[in-house]
Image (cartoon, rainbow, N blue to C red):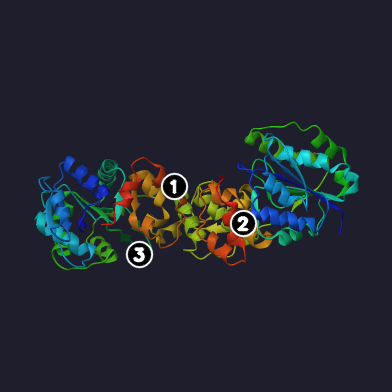
Amino acid sequence: MRCQRHVPQGLSRLLSALTQADAEVVLILADAGPAAQQFAGSGIRIGYAAGRQTRQQLFRAGLKLLGRPEALSQLILCDDSFVALNPTQLLAQTAARAAQLDLAALTMLEAPEPCLQSYWLSFAGQRAVSSAAFSHWWYTDAGDSDVALTRHFLGAGYRVGSLLRLDRSERIVALCRAHACGALPVASPQGDTFLLDPAAAGQLDPTMFAWDRLLAEFGVVALRLVEENPSAVNIVKLRSWIAAAPGVAPLFETHAC
Amino acid sequence: MLNTAVVIAHYDPAGRLAAHLQRFVAHLGSLTRHVVFVSTGLSDAGAARLAPHARVVVRDNYGYDFWSYKVGIEALGDLAAFDRLWVLNSSFIIFDPALLCDRLLQWQGEADLLGLTQSADCGPHLQSYCIAFRTRRVLESRAFARWWGQMTPISDRLQVILQYEIGMSQHFARAGFSSGAAFVPTTAERLTAVFRGIETRNLKVAAIAGEGPVRLQLRDAELLNPTHYAWEGLLERCGILKLELPRDNPHHLELRTLRARLATKPSYLELYEDALTPAR
């Protein structure tokens, strides 16, 4: 994980849930500031990565600190770009759904080519964390992008997929959301009907366009959606909920670390 | 110019007269001498401002807008003097009185009852915030006399909607009168409404089983309140905005472009902010 200066409340809760689940946790911080003090004596190993680094470079720094993970049955790599409202639920759902996959992301884009979103990755099984492909990717500078990571592990024969699965109905909701905010161009209706291909939802970022399913199933909200909302997705309901639900607003307010 | 009577049902918890309403009544006063403004608590100052243009009736607060319509119609006296009757309430901001009057009073079509908007939610009906009885045939009918004569006050909002808003359209349809809407969403607006309805989960997608593309039906837009789901068109072409939309936004629609749109027209933003001033 990565954070600068201060570890926000939401991330603290996730770290607590991980340690309570007896996970070995490595936290990568920008420097030895107050955030490092926060976890003194918690059993969490702290590493430092100064300057601008990509998410994958930070994961590499964490893995170096962790040592060779061959003995692990599961490895989760995540960053602080999201709020987990119920970390215990997230971990349980990850354990339950990731078992059939060697490498699972919470979410992925399907088009124009498969792309795991690396803010939350789970490698399941000893084979997945001890392969040559694993070592090549994480212990050399093999690549930095999510697309490259996905290509690499697909090419190595990993069973790759996402934990969030959208059925046809949810894909239509995502597409309508994208059309409504102008993120997808709208073709002319054919008479009194409009054709929508659920498969086309695969090109949409689920953290933006399926935010309500991600929230309902995993209790996860991407911070970028709330802070920047780059596609101007309709999040009126989300904002109302954040403001009204007990204890939720502070998880977002204190995340500007 | 046809002889037009207008009844305005006003409600404000603080008895305030919004600036847009004052302007609207003044505009109406230039078109007809028969404007009755029925309020459930208008301030004396507000009543004084309207006095040059309208007859003001202040009554106790019960029975919602339909009871004010009835009180106002009775205050008009013999309806035989009028060619048409327009009833509207204070649930929307009228930014452009001339545009609204033009849309409703200059509408070129055949209809005994003309709503500004219509909806098919809970059955097809004209939305009762703005309706014109636009033929002498309907004004002189037994159906008209029976509808308003037999009305009793209902102080439950849902019942008012079901019995009076939806019920009124059904009543006059059963009596053989035709109806229409002055504002008809364009194809693009209907499609946008359907997108909005689905993405906010207020509209279910039918027939999604199987594989391949799904056909969205544009007619489903009729199930969605046009004053909310097609608010841009209503603002642009009729110069109005329902107050409930920015105030409560019950369907969780994205309104981030609202202020920018209002800012493009002279005085719109000013009237909007005045109308949304909280009750003191």
Classify residue A130 as left or right of residue A226.
left
Whether residue B104 is visible here, answered yes or no, is: no
- Say yes or no: labels 2 and 3 on the same chain: no
Image-quadrant location for residue B93 = bottom right
Classify residue B110 as left or right of residue B207.
right
Camera-side mark, 2 or 3: 2
Q: Position of residue B219 (x, y in %)?
A: 64, 52
Q: Residues within 10 Å of mark 3 (few under 14, many from 20)?
A: few
Q: Residues within 10 Å of mark 1 (few under 14, many from 20)?
A: few
In the rendered structure, which amino acid carries the disc numbered 3? Glu
- Say yes or no: labels 1 and 2 on the same chain: no
Asked if the residue under mark 2 is in contact with the one under mark 1, i.e. CB atoms within 8 Å, the reply is no
Distance CA(mark 1)–CA(mark 2): 26 Å
* Residue under numbered circle 2: B190
Q: Position of residue B237 (x, y in %)?
A: 67, 62
Whichever of labels 3 and 1 marks the residue nearer the N terminus, that label is 3
Camera-side mark, 1 or 2: 1
* Residue under numbered circle 3: A113
Image quarter of the C terminus of chain B: top right
Picture disc at residue A202: none
Distance CA(mark 3)–CA(mark 1): 35 Å
Q: Position of residue A14 (x, y in %)?
A: 24, 46
Q: Position of residue A157 (x, y in %)?
A: 23, 59
Q: Residues within 10 Å of mark 2 (few under 14, many from 20)?
A: many
For mark 2, name the chain.
B
In the rendered structure, which amino acid carries the disc numbered 1? Ser
* Residue under numbered circle 1: A240
